[in-house]
Image (cartoon, grey):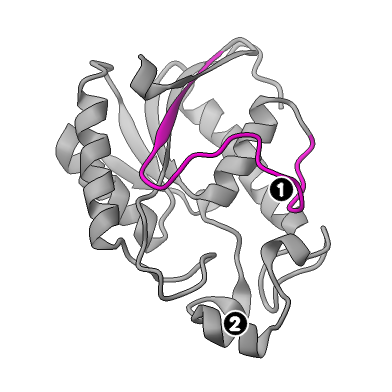
Amino acid sequence: MDFKNKKIKILLVRHGKDVPLRVGGWSDSTLSVLGKEEAKKLGETIKKLNFKFDEIVSSDLPRAKETSEILASELGLPVSYDAEFREINNGDLKNLSKEQTKEKYPGLYFFTLKYDECYPNGESPAQFFSRVTTGFENFVNKYNDKTVILVTHKGVIDILMTILYKRQWSNKAMPIMHIGCGESILIDIIDDDIYINDINEL
């Protein structure tokens, strides 16, 4: 992805811990008590940065929406939702418990999918990568010269890291960087120069 003539500051946030009853993907899982605490604590940490954020952009899945709403309340910022930043569409596995998934789809996991193999009635890793890449390109163009918080999911963050580090992404590869639930990193994109920092070290 070409970032020429772009200048944007992004606080990239992984949603807080969700209730561990269902597999991830497009599930309707909401934040757990811990997840809500993580989001509130993150909001307090962000306040101390003294950055002037313009907006929060969030995946529209419940666990990300809840996280962004807590941050918005803490920071007094508007929120908009973008489905391009959803986790992978796991189709018929959506809202199944881990036990139901093992029973109905034994051995089927994100990392076991072939690159062009779809979840039943869902996305393939290739389609997921294409969606997130297009979504991020549109995001950078829209918010050029702005400072934005982006709340999303582990799978999306893994793809974004490969884009920023100009690596090849695979659903079978180890992530470039681990960002835990309710954690964030600060990304500065300045005309194809990219700087990534842990906000706790700023």
Q: What residue range appears in magenta?
A: 168-189
Q: Is residue 68 magenta?
A: no
What percent of the width, then of the height, locates residue 134? 65, 41
Q: Are marks 2 and 1 in contact (CB under 8 Å)?
A: no
| Residue sitting at x 27%, y 36% | 42
Amino acid of disc 1? Ser
Tell me which corner region of the image, top left, top right, bottom left or bottom right, holds residue 162: top right
From the image, give the main secondary structure of the stretch colored magenta.
loop
Tag 1: Cα neighbours inside 10 Å, few (<14), some, or many (≥20)? some
| Towards the viewer: 145 or 17 | 17
Relative side of 65 to 112, left or right: left
Q: Which residue is under mark 1? A: 130
Judge depth for marks 2 and 1 and give the one in front.
2
What is the CA distance from the residue labelled 2 to the residue labelled 1? 26 Å
Q: Which residue is under mark 2? A: 101
Q: Earlier in the sequence, mark 2 or mark 1?
A: 2
- Identify the secondary structure beneath mark 1: helix
Instruction: Examine the rendered structure and indicate whether residue 99 appears above or below residue 169.
Output: below
| Residue sitting at x 55%, y 27% | 141
